[in-house]
Amino acid sequence: MDTLSDPVLLSRLQFAVTAIFHILWPLLTIGLSLFLVAMEVLWLKTRDEDYYRHVRFWSKLFLLNFTMGVVSGIPMEFEFGANWDRFSGFAGEFFGNALGFEGAMAFMLEAGFLGIMLFGWTRVTPAIHLFASAMVALGASLSAFWILVANSWMQTPAGGHVENGRFRVDSYADAIFNPDMPLAFAHMWGACLETSLFVIGGLSAWYIVRNRHPAFFLKSFKAALLAAVLVAPLQVILGDIKGREVYKTQPVKMAAIEAHWETNPPGQGASWNVLAWPDRQAEANVWAIRLPQVLSLLATTTWDGRVAGLKAFPAADRPPAIGLIFYAFRIMAGIGFALFGLMAWTAWAWSRGGLEPGRVVRQRGLLLAWVAAIPLGYVATECGWIVREVGRQPWVVYGLLRTQEAASQLQPAVVAASLAGFVAVYAVLLVVFLVFAARIVRKGPDMGLAPAHSAAGHPASHGRREAGEGEARHGS
């Protein structure tokens, strides 16, 4: 009942709901757009029409995700004005410009070339089509860049000063490249790539297990694996570096992530809580499984480095929901290591010839593990975002503006009604997405589809052409 009477908490829940739903779709579009470019380059380089069919098949899932991402992201822009008008007034000079750049620079680039990428196969040369695909991929990644610029500035605000209750920008460069931004963008972009690779690999494994075009999907499976060999370990390394950066810039968030209450004395290393049950009222863990000195090593790279505990900070400045932050972080990290292990297992199987066309169907356990891994990247990213956002509380702009001071003055009933409406609409959107995605996956690729142009840009001389696209002009 307390939740229903607190308009600030209701507004936070509303934004959390919309963000949790919205993030599902950009995660895949960013990584999938790069995969499409890679497949198109392989098609132009090898003239293997399977790569062309891969582009056409996976682009259907890209379009579905892009559409859902746009639809689900629009309400978030309005929430800044409706639910967080005092935050908008405080931070609009920088925050509004960052979101404006995202729309004018990234979204327009992505949307402008999307039509050529999807419908230009018979209307432009292969080189121009590849350029359009590359611009779509660049736009998707630029969008993530500007969103992370805005969000990182809220984590470690820089580049200006507060004057008459408003943030005034002194240096856009310092504000954009604030201390949190480089690693935050790299870690999030890596999450998009890793999630996409395990979705592509998992769906490819599903087709192989069902013996549907196994040779065809073995190509996308191997491509996803090759990229995962680079991305999966890099993501673990970036996560480790990001953790030490949080220790320096947001030490109270670090203490909450680790449920670390007492600052360790000089010369005595801080223990790392593998598992624990934090009690915020008692300012202690009810129970914990600890590894001595490991937290000092993780945070400071020394066995006895000082790690400030939660009690070193005023109670009003500590994040709420310590248990949520603690376990969300461990789920994220655990999935990261699990995906790394699956990548290593698959690479080992490939080195022993297990991914050869005649033998891959016998790797049933390995393939089913990839199918099971399809949702893991989404879960890890959502958990990471929870750690990032809940861990920043009670601040909207860290150290400058508290959440209570940022919210609009609304009636609880109004916010509760809009929250219920958002939950219903986004649930419908998710169901619609799953229905159409399942339809695309069940139908599978069109194996009779042949390009209207050869890779060199000349009319193709064999194969079934795309219906309605250049058949009359370029018939063989």
Image: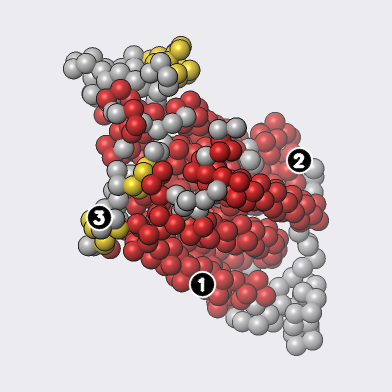
Q: What kind of element bears circle 1? A: helix
Left or right, 38 with reference to 358: left
Residue ID at (50%, 72%): 109
Mark carried by residue 162: 3
Q: Provide the residue designation for mark 1.
A: 108
> Of label 2 and label 1, which has the lower sequence position?
1
Q: Nearer the viewer, residue 172 or 216?
A: 172
Residue ID at (34%, 52%): 153
In the rendered image, the vertical position of residue 406 relative to residue 6, given as above or below: below
Residue 285 in sight here: yes
> Of label 3 and label 1, which has the lower sequence position?
1
The percent coordinates of residue 141 (x first, y second) are: 47, 60
Residue 274 in sight here: no
Left or right, 242 with reference to 385: left
Q: Provide the residue designation for mark 2.
A: 209
Give me the C-alpha separation between circle 3 and circle 1.
32 Å
Residue ID at (34%, 64%): 93
Q: Nearer the viewer, mark 2 or mark 1?
A: 1
Left or right, 31 with reference to 87: right
Residue that lies at the very extreme toward the front in this rendered image: 411
